[in-house]
Image: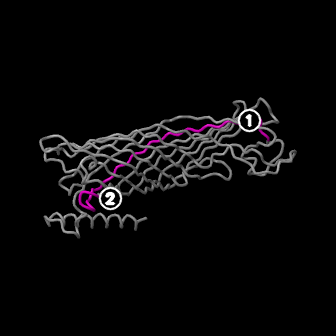
Amino acid sequence: MHRFYWVILFGVSMFQSICEAAEKQGANPPNIKGLYFGGPLLSDDSFGYSMGGDYILWLYVVEGYPTAVSNVEVSGNSYKGPGSFNQPIFPLLNGFKVYGSVLLKENQNMDIKAKYTWLQRTTKTTTGQGGGTTIAISNLLDGTRTEDSLLDSWATSTRLVFNLINIDAGRSCILVDDTLNFRPYFGIVGVYNKNTLSSILEFSVRPGRPFLSVQTFSVGAGGVRAGFNMDWTPFVSSTYFKEFKLCAEAALSGIFGETKVDATNSINSVVTTRSQDYLYRSTPIVEFQMGFGWNKMFGSETNDRYNIELHALWELQNWIGYNRFYNPGYSFGNLTLQGLTLGASLEF
């Protein structure tokens, strides 16, 4: 881990030194062309700030949530076919991002950006009927496939609380004049998430006495993040489409912090078992997004006082080994978030 930090510090110092050398050149020779500032070149009257917001519509899925399994062989029936798993149907969630940045003109136009992401806290319930070949997932995995484990019905629901903060420092650089820009960045990340999984199982051997399982785990963590943005303007010579661009971003984060796990089981509102656990762990996060953008400079006689940018992106986040629910044989699955991101920003 210490070696990783030293590599980051070495890379940053080298980047800074080369940028300073490039600025002293006062020219744009091919070997240092990519180090020149690639962001909007606003007038000296601009403040160097930007602000923006996104609407997000994301599907979230957590692996390791099966509740019941149907069409399996148990004692008392003769079914021999493959079984099928029953689990929550994960919903599409609305949400938003808000972000802002400041341009450090005195430091080779590096920028500091901060972004907050929030997702809707919707609960979705999935239900199903049992029968002669439906059992609880725990009975399937511990080998107790008997008539006592048969279900008349089942219901399961899931809920996500999602809060993510990113703060990073980077610099937009020109890779190909007026066409291809590249912005490497590094920074910190903060997370507070809470997941809830509730299941109601109605066993055939005790009708009218449903078994309720409620599990929650919350994650409060922080860590480091590094990645890059790229945008390509393919029609730079066009009269009508020169502001159109293709956008992409990739990032890798590592967070470390406390995870609190609570589990309560009850029958007819009478608690049968309760457990609580605390652990400190690390979670890698892989992010990727790609889509379309459009930006336009305007204001003042030279049209360089403001810059507006619009974008439509597909975004993916994968939180590796995120799940900490106790579900025998299915623990420690990934959290995947993916979907549409629509937004706009203004630099001034």
Crowd band around label 1 with a 10 angstrom C-alpha radius: few (<14), some (14–19), many (20+): few
Q: Disc number at residue 129?
A: 1
Q: Say which of 309 and 120 sits in front.
A: 309
Q: Is residue 175 left or right of residue 315?
A: left
Q: Is residue 194 left or right of residue 30?
A: right
The residue type indicated by label 1 comes to Gln
Q: Say which of 348 and 170 sits in front.
A: 348
| Residue 292 rendering spot, x and y as whole percentages | 36, 48
Picture mark count: 2
| Residue 342 rendering spot, x and y as whole percentages | 39, 41
Displayed quadrant of residue 1: bottom left
Q: Earlier in the sequence, mark 2 or mark 1?
A: 1
Q: Is residue 337 visible?
A: yes
Magenta-colored span: 150-179
**Colour basis:** one colour
Q: Chief secondary structure of the magenta span?
A: strand
Q: Residue furthest bottom?
A: 31
Crowd band around label 2 with a 10 angstrom C-alpha radius: few (<14), some (14–19), many (20+): some
Q: Disc number at residue 143?
A: none
| Alpha carbons under labels 2 and 1: distance apart | 53 Å
